[in-house]
Amino acid sequence: GLGLFAGRDLEKHTMVIEYIGELIRNEVANKREKLYEQQNRGIYMFRLDEEYVVDATMSGCLARYINHSCEPNSIAEVVQIEKDSKIIIITNRRIAKGEEIMYDYKFDFEEDSKIPCLCGAANCRKWMN
């Protein structure tokens, strides 16, 4: 993927960015995912909860370019702001300026369609799900 890189030094527990996109139901996300695959598009979706997904494929922010790592320097967290759920990326250690920001995608396990991991981390699980 393209990746997102720190523009300055970031301390541990610093909010980096919000994952922004269109809020859609799971059923719509499943249909769109198939459509995007047929169109040979990159798919940028993030499951918010059991019912909703944030689709950043067509409109989103730079957070959609953050790559996966089995040894991440950030975490994705769902937080409540007033009545809305938001996805934010927070550092889990100090990150130096210019370092790539990464988090563990933690995809749902699907035995029939395992997704290979190429993150290169020393403790790589070899699969993203």
Image (cartoon, helix red, strand yellow):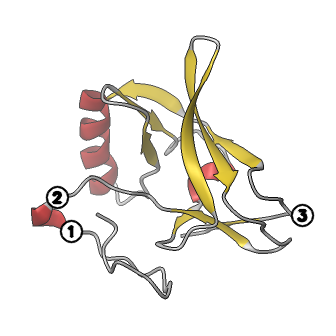
Name the side, left or right, on which 32 lies relative to 83. Answer: left
Q: Which residue is depicted at the point 49% across and 45% down?
A: 57
Q: Which residue is depicted at the point 44% across and 58% down?
A: 105
Instruction: Check disc 3 and give the amino acid type.
Output: Arg
Instruction: Check disc 1 and give the amino acid type.
Output: Lys
- What percent of the width, then of the height, locates residue 101? 67, 65
- Residue 80 vertical placement versus 67 (above, below): above
**How far, Cα to Cα, is label 1 from label 2?**
6 Å
Q: Nearer the viewer, residue 64 or 87?
A: 87
Pointer 1 local density, CA inside 10 Å: few below 14, some 14–19, many at least 20? some
Query: Do callouts 3 and 1 mark residues in contact (Cβ within 8 Å)?
Result: no
Q: Which residue is mark 1?
A: 114
Residue 8 is marked as 3
Pointer 3 local density, CA inside 10 Å: few below 14, some 14–19, many at least 20? few
Q: Which residue is mark 2?
A: 110
N-terminal of the pair, mark 3 or mark 2, is 3
**How far, Cα to Cα, is label 3 from label 1?**
35 Å
Query: Do callouts 1 and 2 mark residues in contact (Cβ within 8 Å)?
Result: yes
- What percent of the width, then of the height, locates residue 42? 44, 58
Instruction: Check disc 2 and give the amino acid type.
Output: Glu
Res 85 → quadrant: top right
- What percent of the width, then of the height, locates residue 34? 24, 47
Q: Which residue is depicted at the point 40% across and 26% down?
A: 24
Q: Which residue is depicted at the point 44% across and 83% down?
A: 123
Q: Nearer the viewer, residue 62 or 77?
A: 77
- What percent of the width, then of the height, locates residue 118? 42, 82
